[in-house]
Amino acid sequence: MTQETSPPSFAGWADVAPLLVDVAAGRRPADRVVRGGAWVNVHTREVLAGHDIAITAGRIAFVAPNASHCIGDRTDVIEAEGRYMIPGLCDGHMHIESGMLTPAEFARAVIPQGTTSMFTDPHEIANVLGLEGVRMMHDEALMQPINIFTQMPSCAPSAPGMETTGFEISAADVAEAMTWPGIIGLGEMMNFPGVSNADPQMLAEIAATQRAGKTVGGHYASPDLGPAFAAYVAGGPADDHEGTCEADAVARMRLGMRSMIRLGSAWYDVQSQITAITEKGLDPRNMILCTDDSHSGTIVNDGHMNRVVRHAIECGCEPLVALQMATINTATHFGLEREIGSLTPGRRADVILTSDLNALPIEVVIARGEVVARDGICLADCPHYDWPAEACATVNMARDLTAADFHIAAPEGANAVTANVIGVVENQAPTQALKFELPVTEGRVQATGEVAQIALVERHRATGGVVNGFVSGFGYE
């Protein structure tokens, strides 16, 4: 089954092919020409100086050393002045909600950073508003001037029996979402034990996605690379971003998955895995760069996918290989290599001008043929969905909380206790199971030193539940 990859407001290649042909042949002027740049070709891993790119109807019509025959009186000519012309960057796995933003405002934040395509899994809103919440995120994504492809969340809850969500996602929900125009596949399959143990619902969701001809996202958060991992891969997930070491990346690629290595606000997993390419010499086509979770502060201060590409280069990756991992590799994985990911005829005209392939300053951004950012300033309109009032009033509490809800009672007569403590590992997803001796004051266990108290408050179903615990690793004194 073939999916529709173009949002309703953007014409497909087949629809505008006559225009592209006429522009390339010189029978019709281009809408825009980028002139005199160094063409970074991610198909052949070449940099070709002195090239022009002719654009019409939001797509690339012509790439060659001289596009003067494509220029008419009304053609907008952008002088590249020898700068590199690279494809717009693609984020292969991310969650808009982690930025504390809506799709429109996330787009506004990342456009000046050179991100023109995102593959986003809105599983946070699925936890709160279910399928209708996903639909609203999907609809606002389609309104944007860049390409935001939505993956249907697979796991709400992510760990059945261990958490309470506002809504639960069913296999029927997944099947329905596969008919929506902006759905590119299934979001990360977080219930990896369920897949490995042939849980009927998890396999039904995967099957609905596969029958729709779309991509199944993975999430195998375990160091066990034995039969459980093999069973997970056999279940159908096509990629995974939960690796933390070289062996994880190698295992995924050897079994035909794409290894997605991430640099977000909290996860720093590129350096430990990219050695599979830079040192072990494996084929880089099966490795993809992504962010997973980027807080808005990280985006504004450090960047988005441009930050990830720079970091990969700093870790020893060749610049052109790093760019492939953030463009054509991602596009190919999702079946969109004829649509995005390279500066070649017919593709969406998503172009970045940069003066340095290592430092990667984002100087001009073109998305679908339009100049959307220049020198760090977003120039595009990012329309907002008309969010209903109920989507903005989702905290459902049974009562007001008091200090007593956060008391942790000690055994009677105890002056100290040995407490279980969650050990946070900086910039990593896995945690440690630790034990600390903690003091008791007036019958209550006290956090002290590097140990802090943490609480989980049930906010979906007004149960009034509050669960308290202890955590270390945040650097508290």
Image: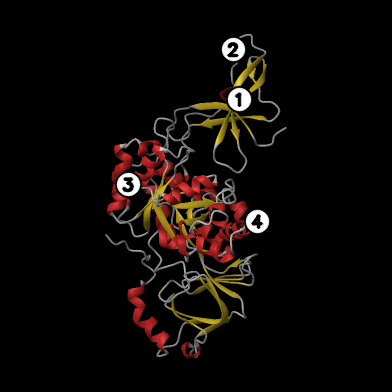
Near-viewer residue (79 or 315): 315
Please report contact status of discs 2 and 3: CB closer than 8 Å, yes or no: no
Helix, strand or loop status at disc 3: helix
Q: Where is 367 relative to 101, above or below?
A: below
Mark 2: few/some/many CA within 10 Å (<14, 14-19, 20+): few
Q: Tell me the residue that label 1 is attached to.
A: 403
Q: Earlier in the sequence, mark 2 or mark 3?
A: 3
Q: Earlier in the sequence, mark 3 or mark 4?
A: 3
Q: Where is 307 relative to 169, above or below?
A: below
> What amino acid is found at the position of numbered circle 3 in the picture?
Ile
Q: Tell me the residue that label 3 is attached to.
A: 206
Q: Real-space Cα distance between discs 1 and 4?
A: 36 Å
Q: Earlier in the sequence, mark 2 or mark 4?
A: 4
Where is residue 101? Give x, y as percent.
53, 52
Helix, strand or loop status at disc 1: helix
Q: Real-space Cα distance between discs 3 and 4?
A: 38 Å
Residue drawn at 56 percent across, 35 percent down: 431
Q: Earlier in the sequence, mark 2 or mark 1?
A: 1
